[in-house]
Amino acid sequence: DGGITQSPKYLFRKEGQNVTLSCEQNLNHDAMYWYRQDPGQGLRLIYYSQIVNDFQKGDIAEGYSVSREKKESFPLTVTSAQKNPTAFYLCASSMLLGRGSYEQYFGPGTRLTVT
Amino acid sequence: AQKITQTQPGMFVQEKEAVTLDCTYDTSDQSYGLFWYKQPSSGEMIFLIYQGSYDEQNATEGRYSLNFQKARKSANLVISASQLGDSAMYFCAMRPRGGSNYKLTFGKGTLLTVNP
């Protein structure tokens, strides 16, 4: 089955540690995205990538880093510089913009807790 | 800049009845797309329906329909014949069409509860 996998579902870290969240897709989508969701809030874009080895900052990129070495993979690192890292993180992918809706497909999410 | 407003933090509906979830938007783009997503308690976002700004007819997908009023800048989601499984958060979102702007802007969501 085609889809997006994120692992792990729950992640716990101590303050001051970097942590990397995994995102893999087998939909052959060109674009991939990382969002953050806080309780009672909508999604906010952290980073997105349109093509391998290229990515752009979203609205809240500070304290995060990404890489896109393969089309299928777009890992997100939450660094110790992120002041409030505890949140629900969602990865998504889509075809590139053009005609049609090109909706974003989402993974199941990773709930990160930093204490 | 784009902005999505969902004014209903929570809504209740009886099973088998229809419900409308409100969404208004603001954009300076001439061409744009509007989306609705469902987020169950499990957390994943499920795409429901899409409306292009130049589509002449309102979008429909099964029990979901989008009441698109361009002049009012509203894109309300109508769920007919509500089911218990429809209980979830619902998010309205939009993005420009064309160009290199891929960003989806989301509203804060509406929590729908379907009562038996």
Image (cartoon, helix red, strand yellow):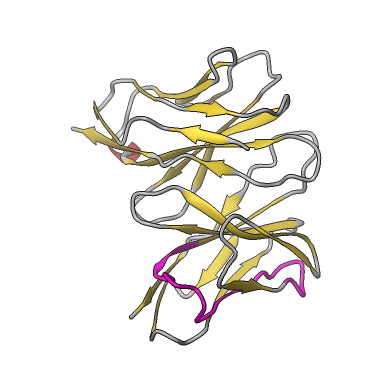
Q: Residue at x 62, y 29 (%)?
A: B27
Q: In this view, does B34 lie above or below A19?
A: above
- From the top left corner, tell me how far across and down residue A4 is, in percent: 59, 61
- For residue A1, say whether it is visible: no
At a point 65% along the width and 46% down the height, the residue shown is B103
Residue drawn at x 34%, y 49% is A40
The quadrant in which residue A32 appears is bottom right
Q: Does A12 sit left or right of A49 as displayed?
A: left
In the picture, the quarter occupied by the C terminus of chain A is bottom left
How far across and how far down the image is residue B92, in percent? 49, 35
The answer to whether residue B17 shows anywhere in this view is yes
Camera-side residue of B27 and A48? B27
Residue A59 screen position, x and y as percent = 59, 55
- Nearest the viewer among A66 and B80 is A66
Q: Quadrant of residue B88?
A: top left
Give A1 or B26, whichever is nearer the viewer: B26
Residue B32 in magenta? no
Q: Give the range drawn in magenta.
A: A68-89
